[in-house]
Amino acid sequence: MLIPTVEYCLVCEDVRPEPFGKMSILGFYGQTPSVNIKIKDVGGTIKILFVLGMKAKEAGKYEFTAALYDPNKQELGQVGVVVEITSPVQQQVLAVGFVLPVQVLGTYAFKLHMGSKRAYQTTLQIMHAAPADFNLN
């Protein structure tokens, strides 16, 4: 079975299901690899959701393992996810979330594997926010 192609990866805090198969993206951080998450203090936790748009050359059920790594290459969490692609023409959306303890600033890596093969990899930055970042004006 061929590995599906990831066409995009959005990063947000959460999604909310809507009627007619839609979803609302909440707390949008950006599209990888150009994601900069600004935090007030190291030592807290943040919720990160990766929303991946996928296409496959053949219909089927695809099982993945998603993992998140800190700047020191330490695995912070791993989750198994399944996406069913019913038509090779239609794009499917896969959402994978983590509650992340932020102990260090820097470049974090997200990796998606199908068995022993890497299906997708990307990065994001977690950095200190400036006081002006907390103003809504």
Image: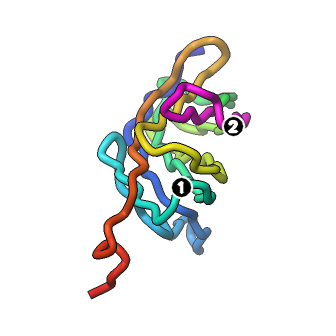
Instruction: Describe the element under mark 2 as helix, strand or loop.
Output: strand
Say above or below: 40 vs 121.
below
Highlighted range, magenta = 66-81
Given residues 24 and 35, the one toward you in this image is 35
Camera-side mark, 1 or 2: 1
Give the camera-side residue of 64 and 49: 49
Left or right, 127 with respect to 54, comes to left
| Crowd tier of the residue under label 1, counting other residues whose Cα lies within 10 Å: few below 14, some 14–19, many 20 or above | some
* Residue in the image at 66% along x and 53% along y: 99
Please tell me in which quadrant of the rendered image residue 134 appears.
Answer: bottom left
Amino acid carrying label 1: it is Val
Expressed as whole percent of the image width and height from the top left, the position of residue 18 reads: 58, 73
Examine the residues drawn in magenta and state their main secondary structure.
strand
Residue 120, image x, y percentages? 47, 27
Is the N terminus in the top left, top right, bottom left or bottom right quadrant?
A: top right
The correct choice, above or below, for 116 with respect to 53 in the image is above
Which residue reaches farthest bottom?
137
Query: Which quadrant of the figure has residue 133?
Result: bottom left
Q: Nearer the viewer, residue 27 or 4?
A: 27
The residue wearing badge 1 is: 42
Which residue is situated farthest in the right direction here?
A: 80
For mark 1, give the secondary structure. loop
| Label 2 sits on residue | 77
